[in-house]
Amino acid sequence: MKTLKKLFYFSFIISLSLFVSCEGEDGMDGLNGEQGIQGEPGQDGNANVIGVTVDPFPSWTSGSYLGQEANFVEITETSLTEAVIDDALVLVYFQLFGDNVWYPMTYAFPFDSGNEEVITYTYEPDLVTIYALSTTGPLNASISKVRYFIIPTSDATARSASTREMKVQQLWDKGIDINSYEEVANYLNQ
């Protein structure tokens, strides 16, 4: 029994020693690991926006614009249905001479002589038409590329004029300059 008491006492001391020796102060946390790779940001919800590039730009045809002689090019665009036209904004940009600078339409360039050159557009069902004219007659503008965006509104009950004005205002409110192709293209993820 004496041996059993010694064994019990000895076991108790060892257990107590182990218990006490396991306690200690909380140490500093280790270094954080490297940040993992983040995924690509998602789309801004512009899934219905249509962006079209016409490259190379077709040859001009003689005609008129608002009763004045002008050159024009017609671009067939089947996405421009009557319903889309009543409910969308269409923005058009172009490049001249093969340079990588985008100009907004309507573009007007006045000369010191009082003459002016104008490049503009219209749209209707199935058609975008680009016009080029000057105060002296048709203009053979050296357009190398055209890009246009068809931006539908999210409110299908809105009417055409007010819808386009609202969409332009929404872009301006978000800090997007609609005269800047780069800002519009970046915003629309096009």
Image (cartoon, helix red, strand yellow):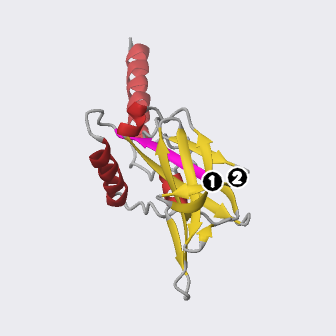
Look at mark 2 in the image and give the residue it sits on. 57
Residue at 56% across, 88% down: 113
Q: Can residue 189 be seen in this view?
A: no
Q: Identify the magenta region.
A: 147-153
The amino acid type found where label 2 is placed reads Phe
> Which image quadrant is residue 17 in?
top left
> What is the x, y in percent for residue 135?
54, 74
Q: How many labels does the image show?
A: 2
Q: What element carries label 2?
A: loop
Residue at 35% across, 40% down: 153
Is residue 176 or residue 149 the one in the foreground?
A: 149
74 to the left or right of 42: right
Residue at 45% across, 40% down: 46
> What is the x, y in percent for residue 38?
55, 43
> What is the x, y in percent for residue 72?
61, 54
> What is the x, y in percent for residue 73?
63, 50
Look at mark 1 in the image and give the residue it sits on. 146
Is residue 20 or residue 56 the one in the foreground?
A: 56
Against 136, is 72 above or below? above
Residue at 51% across, 54% down: 121
In the rendered structure, are the residues bearing label 1 and label 2 in contact, judged by CB atoms less than 8 Å apart? yes
The amino acid type found where label 1 is placed reads Val
Q: Can residue 11 be seen in this view?
A: yes
